[in-house]
Amino acid sequence: DVQLQASGGGLVQAGGSLRLSCAVSVSGFPLDDVAIGWFRQAPGEQREGVSALRFSDGGKRYEDFVKGRFTIFSDNAKNVVYLQMNNLEPGDTAVYYCAADEYGLGALGPYEYTYWGQGTQVTVSS
């Protein structure tokens, strides 16, 4: 089983930064088996992948629309995965979710992920 707790959302002006946190608790299999993904969903839109990280080898993926602005990284001692978001744009406004893939692939399709945390709202004003 995997429990996820996302936090760190808020209201920020365009060009500002936020850091989202996803606290990960795993039972029944090693943390190295897991990949953590960040996803977002704007009102009226489908949920889309943002970034993912594999605990097994530290491999990372980003969607093109966040490359150069967002960074995913982990604190393995604390079992926390962060999403550092810089140079935020109004188009980044959404509810952000972290999710776990117990097969550790670290893809960016939501259907790859079994476990989901609650969302955290990110609002970027122009």
Image (cartoon, grey):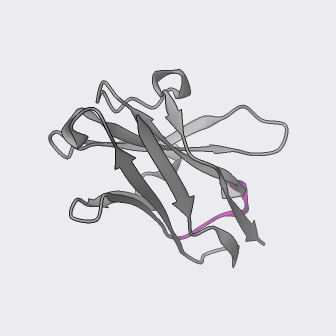
User: Looking at the image, which residue is at 66% across and 56% down?
Assistant: 92
Q: Residue 70 appears at what percent x and percent y?
A: 44, 59
Q: Which part of the image, by quadrant, shows the N terminus?
A: top left
Q: Position of residue 82 (x, y in %)?
A: 40, 61
Is 103 drawn above or below residue 116 in the view shown? above
Q: Farthest residue in the right direction?
A: 44
Does 105 appear above or below 34?
A: above
- Residue 62: in sight, yes or no? no
Q: Quadrant of the C terminus?
A: bottom right
Q: Is residue 107 left or right of residue 59?
A: right
- Residue at 60% x, 35% y is 48
Q: Residue at x 60, y 67 (%)?
A: 88
Q: Nearer the viewer, residue 78 or 111?
A: 78
Residue lying at 32% horizontally and 39% vertically, measured from the top left: 27
Count of numbered circles in the view: 0
Q: Is residue 16 left or right of residue 19?
A: right
Q: Which residues are magenta?
A: 87-91
Residue 107 occupies quadrant:
top left
Q: On the rendered structure, is 8 left or right of 71?
A: right
In front: 121, or 90?
Answer: 121
- Name the spot of residue 73 as percent of width and height, x first: 31, 59
Compared with residue 112, is residue 30 higher up or lower down, i.e. above or below? below
- Residue 50 in the magenta stretch? The answer is no
Residue 68 percent across, percent down from the top left: 40, 58
What is the chief secondary structure element of the magenta stretch?
loop
